[in-house]
Image (tube, rainbow, N blue to C red):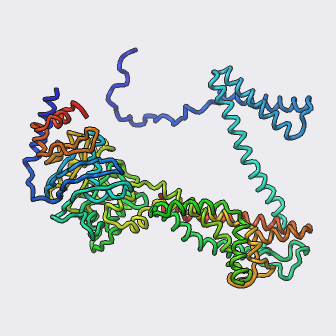
């Protein structure tokens, strides 16, 4: 059949003609998946038997056996059904799946543990009470962590307000101005991002408390966090701005704009979603920081609405303090604090993402 | 075979030239040299661009056409190692003289780039009017200007019902016409086009060539192109650039019909007949 079957001019579909159903011919059929399924069952069964009849024992032994047997079984099946290349492909696929699982496992385990231990202490009351009139040993339905929650929000918000302009302007200096000092600035930003968090706390302690004779305040804590946050924001924002094509900047300049106008109206809007990510990463860097706060906010069991005067608490501080007390209810309070901190950070991320994507791409 | 090609290009070109009349010199390049670091990339280029005409710059890759066109609206200086010598006169005044407001220069000498580059964060409407915002020009009737620019860029009928969609939703050819409309909104005297059709399909290319012809009635247009047919179709004058390994030079400049039918220089003839390059 060598006639030109398909080369008739296209006719419109006659009325009532059936349009073919959309299918996905590249998807494996159940029959094709059967050997893989059998292989997986074999691997599980074989590892159970090996663990039962050999000195290998416990979860770790089972896991090690299961990984090795899976690799052997999968590569043999692929080799028998296809060739050596398919076998190599199967081995790398399985290794990648296991490695991905290894990354997920601790994360899921942490979340599970936080929910398991933190949830019992949850009640509406903890969001309306502080610990000013409650002992940590009191039953969990008394007292609360409002003071720590408010303290945390204060500290992080103030640090963010300080860090966003400094961090973004630093990134703009590095990418847009790219002046003579850019190399030095980039070096210091990178060096700063490696600073251990307690050093940031000590720095504020040394400057504010010792040199200037200041006292513990929320603001001092947020300055310590800002030191950690600025390099994170600056570096991420720099990477994001570097991705904006030179074309766009030149288009702006060719329209008779000054460099400042081009940056403000073209470059920053184009990088908007990435810049929001830079800020999120900055907040993520500091939201759970404990060490710098221990040296700067001083701790408090009561509410302190004034960020510029008097001691304050923060969720990490509250967690640290309750773990330190060591009694059963105190430890339960600490876990609840961890749970609340995790949820607050998650809510914040989600909100920022929604706001960031509001105006399309 | 090559003779036929030359003849056909020449006839296209002469048909084009006869219908335009030059209205005096709009932009003049005087003894332009350019360097990147120590590398001398352009040597002693002098070329006049007449108002109301289209000048095509042709030549093999790497002969300095793009560098030259970027010197004409001071985009050259954004490359850190760049240097230049010579003068570019707009209405008789050097655009490189000291104390000149370079943003005003670029406002008067617009540019369309090789790759369509609409601003991704802006809608079609905002893209067209972006020049006003960027150059801080206030106007009263922006809707009229919007329509006028899009009509002149040959895009109005395709986008008039979707002005609030993002520029990135258009096809490549439409995006390039959007970029042309964007350049027109600030009312430049001169429009520089650096291979504006190299990323486009033949249909979009023809649309843009029509646009160029319509625009050339009251603007000076300079277009860099690798497409000889395009040079023949749209331009009144053609300049041929060539580098023999050293800095790029302007080998010959003449009315387009002459370049394609009766070039004076052997190298021009070899290039336009496709014997090299």
- Decide if residue A53 is on the left or right side of residue A99: right
- Looking at the image, which residue is at 86% across and 76% down? A142
Q: Residue furthest top?
A: A1
Q: Answer whether residue A11 is visible to the viewer in this image.
A: yes
- Decide if residue A309 is on the left or right side of residue A302: left
- Looking at the image, which residue is at 68% across and 72% down? A224
Q: Does B233 sit above or below residue A184? A: above
User: In the image, residue B142 lies at what x, y percent?
Assistant: 29, 69
The residue lying toward the viewer, choosing from A51 and A255, is A255
Instruction: Give the image quarter of residue B60.
Output: top left
User: In the image, residue A276 lies at what x, y percent?
Assistant: 55, 63
Instruction: Give the image quarter of residue B270.
Output: top left
Q: Residue furthest front?
A: B38
- Looking at the image, which residue is at 9% across and 52% down? B20
The residue lying toward the viewer, choosing from A335 and A208, is A208
Q: Does A334 sit above or below residue A308? A: above
- Looking at the image, which residue is at 20% across and 50% down? B45
The residue lying toward the viewer, choosing from B172 and B195, is B195
User: In the image, residue A300 lies at what x, y percent?
Assistant: 79, 79
User: In the image, residue B177 lies at what x, y percent?
Assistant: 29, 53
- Decide if residue A47 is on the left or right side of residue B40: right
């Amino acid at each position: 059949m060598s006639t030109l079957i398909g080369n008739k001019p296209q006719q419109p579909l006659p009325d009532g003609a059936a349009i073919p159903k959309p299918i996905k011919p590249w998807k494996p059929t159940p029959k094709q998946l059967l050997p893989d399924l059998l292989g997986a069952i074999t691997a599980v069964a074989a590892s159970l038997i090996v663990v039962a009849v050999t000195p290998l024992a416990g979860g770790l032994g089972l896991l090690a056996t299961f990984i090795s047997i899976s690799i052997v079984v999968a590569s043999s099946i692929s080799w028998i059904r296809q060739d050596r290349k398919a076998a190599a492909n199967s081995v790398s696929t399985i290794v990648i799946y296991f490695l991905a699982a290894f990354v997920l496992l601790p994360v899921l385990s942490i979340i599970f543990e936080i929910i398991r231990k933190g949830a019992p202490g949850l009640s509406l009351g903890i969001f309306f009470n502080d610990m000013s009139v409650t002992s940590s040993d009191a039953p969990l339905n008394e007292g609360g962590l409002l003071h720590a929650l408010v303290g945390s929000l204060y500290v992080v918000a103030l640090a963010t307000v300080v860090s966003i302009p400094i961090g973004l302007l630093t990134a703009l200096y590095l990418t847009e101005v790219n002046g003579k000092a850019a190399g030095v600035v980039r070096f210091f930003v990178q060096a700063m991002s490696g600073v251990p968090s307690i050093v940031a706390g000590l720095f504020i302690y040394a400057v504010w408390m010792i040199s200037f004779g200041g006292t513990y305040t929320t603001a001092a804590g947020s300055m310590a966090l800002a030191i950690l946050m600025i390099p994170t924001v600056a570096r991420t924002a720099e990477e994001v701005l570097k991705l904006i094509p030179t074309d766009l900047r030149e288009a702006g300049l060719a329209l008779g704009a000054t460099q400042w106008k081009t940056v403000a109206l073209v470059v920053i809007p184009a990088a908007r979603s990435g810049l929001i990510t830079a800020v999120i990463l900055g907040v993520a860097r500091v939201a759970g920081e404990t060490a710098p706060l221990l040296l700067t906010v001083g701790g408090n069991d009561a509410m302190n609405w004034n960020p510029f005067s008097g001691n304050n608490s923060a969720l990490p501080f509250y967690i640290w303090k309750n773990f330190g007390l060591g009694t059963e209810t105190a430890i339960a309070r600490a876990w609840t604090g961890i749970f609340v901190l995790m949820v607050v950070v998650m809510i914040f991320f989600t909100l920022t993402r929604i706001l960031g994507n509001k105006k399309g791409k | 075979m090559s003779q036929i090609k030359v003849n056909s290009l020449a006839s296209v070109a002469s048909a084009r030239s006869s219908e335009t009349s030059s209205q005096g010199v709009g932009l003049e390049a005087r003894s332009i040299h350019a360097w990147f670091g120590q590398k001398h990339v352009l040597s002693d280029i002098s070329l006049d661009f007449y108002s109301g005409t289209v000048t095509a710059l042709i030549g093999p890759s790497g002969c300095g056409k793009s560098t030259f066109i970027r010197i004409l609206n001071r985009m050259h200086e954004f490359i850190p190692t760049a240097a230049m010598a010579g003068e570019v006169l707009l209405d008789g005044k050097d655009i490189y003289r000291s104390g000149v407001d370079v943003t005003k220069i670029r406002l008067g000498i617009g540019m369309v780039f090789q790759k369509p580059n609409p601003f991704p964060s802006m809608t079609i409407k905002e893209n067209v009017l972006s020049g006003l915002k960027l150059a801080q020009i206030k106007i009263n009737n922006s809707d009229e200007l919007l329509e006028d620019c899009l009509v002149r860029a040959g895009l109005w009928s395709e986008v008039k019902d979707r002005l609030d969609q993002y520029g990135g939703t258009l096809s490549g050819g439409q995006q390039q016409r959007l970029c042309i409309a964007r350049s027109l909104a600030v009312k430049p005297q001169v429009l520089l086009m650096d291979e504006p059709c190299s990323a486009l399909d033949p249909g979009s290319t023809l649309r843009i060539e029509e646009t160029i012809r319509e625009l050339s009635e009251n603007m000076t247009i300079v277009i860099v192109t690798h497409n000889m047919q395009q040079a023949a179709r749209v331009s009144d004058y053609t300049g041929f650039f060539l580098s023999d390994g050293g800095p790029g030079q302007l080998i010959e400049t003449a009315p387009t019909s002459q370049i394609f039918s009766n070039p004076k220089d052997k190298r021009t003839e070899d290039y336009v007949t496709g014997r090299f390059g």
